[in-house]
Amino acid sequence: MNLDTTYDIIVLGDYFYDLIFSGLQAFPVLGQEKISRDLVTTGGAAYITVRSLYRLGARVGWRGHFGSDEYSREIYQLAAGEGIDMRLARVSDLPYRRVTAALPFQGERAFITYADPIPTDRHPFWLEALTTCEYRHVHLTGALALELLAPLATAARAVGATISMDCQDVALLYTDCQWQKIIRMVDVFMPNAREARLIAKTDDLDAAMRLLLDWGRTIVIKDGASGALVGEGTGAYTRVPAIHAGLCVDTTGAGDCFNAGFLYNYVCEAAPLETCASYGNICGGLSVTREGGATHAPDLATLRAWLTEG
């Protein structure tokens, strides 16, 4: 590949095309039509984290897959038009449709999603970037089974890079898998509160945090309006409060935006965990005031102003 850029962060993950119906006065029920006040189309999933990192000034590379369909084309062009480095991405001659209709309502949201099958060579495609590029950190946008994660983590560590992993609502959450070994494989594990409870098999979030800390190096649990729990393998952890940036319009992608703020501070500024979580909370808190996870992603000056004034 021989790219002439050393990346701060390489993001491994694919796009979604988000179709967001906002301003619903009542939630849809069978047999009735509801009218939304607005409609927004934008990028979702990995796009949110990539775009948010780029806005903060990180040298970010996106190792994502796009197809020949109009949804792939629109999000690829959206990212490239914003100046995001797309040299690590690939575009195939086949459709790769990944579409989510989101219905925000009273601070929560519901989704309907369609996704074409994942390319069979996705993980070798990811691994190639980690063995041919220069980078400081790798971020996985969703949890992987141990046999898929291990080669990626090994490649990152071979060049002295760190690795983080979000969870997302993956099938692994509903199976008996090797969570202890999976979490130990990464430097930072970043589930949300629901995912942490499912993994730990408890309704007590503090108990879930303590268990995950027994298993992992650094644990970050995103807890929405309640902020984030952060801790290292010593067993000690703290809750970092969220910000209130205004009316909550759409929580779609807030966790992905949080990841960007946290990782920018963690990788590019080598800051303490609590400061990293504050960066994440500001990014996530600002994101919910507009439709779409990355539409209100802050630049670094805006983020630091919130940190100082907060």
Image (cartoon, grey):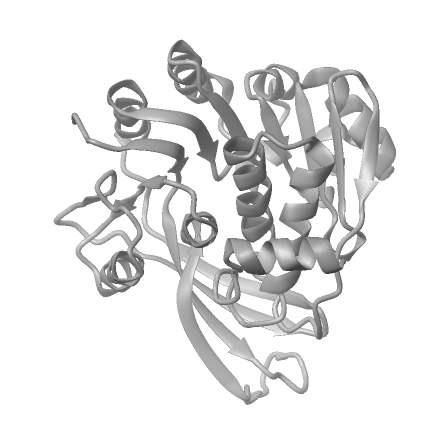
Query: Looking at the image, how many numbered discs can be counted on the residues?
Result: 0
- The reply to whether residue 198 is in sight is no
Above or below residue 68? Residue 208 is above
Quarter of the image containing the N terminus?
Answer: top left
Q: Is residue 288 left or right of residue 73?
A: right
What residue is at 79 percent from the left and 16 percent from the top? 234
Q: Between 204 and 61, which is closer to the camera in this rendering?
A: 61
Q: Name which residue lies at 53% across and 45% down.
A: 260
Q: Nearer the viewer, residue 73 or 139?
A: 139
Q: Looking at the rendering, which quadrant does residue 187 occupy?
A: top right
Rendered view: 222 above or below 107? above
Can residue 264 be spotted in the picture?
yes
Residue at 25% x, 42% y: name it.
Answer: 89
Q: Quadrant of residue 161?
A: top left
Kindly identify the residue that appears in the image at 16 percent across and 50 percent down: 94
Between residue 96 and residue 73, name the one nearer to us. Answer: 73
Name the image quarter holding the C terminus. Answer: bottom right
Against 305, is 202 above or below? above
Q: Say left or right for 303 vs 78.
A: right
Q: Where residue 151 appears, x then y in whole percent?
A: 39, 15
In this rendering, would 91 be left or right of 96? left
* Image location (x, y in percent) of residue 16: 39, 56
Percent x, y for residue 76? 26, 56
Tell me which corner region of the image, top left, top right, bottom left or bottom right, holds residue 254.
Answer: bottom right
Q: Nearer the viewer, residue 304 or 15?
A: 304
Residue 219 image position (x, y, % from top left): 69, 29
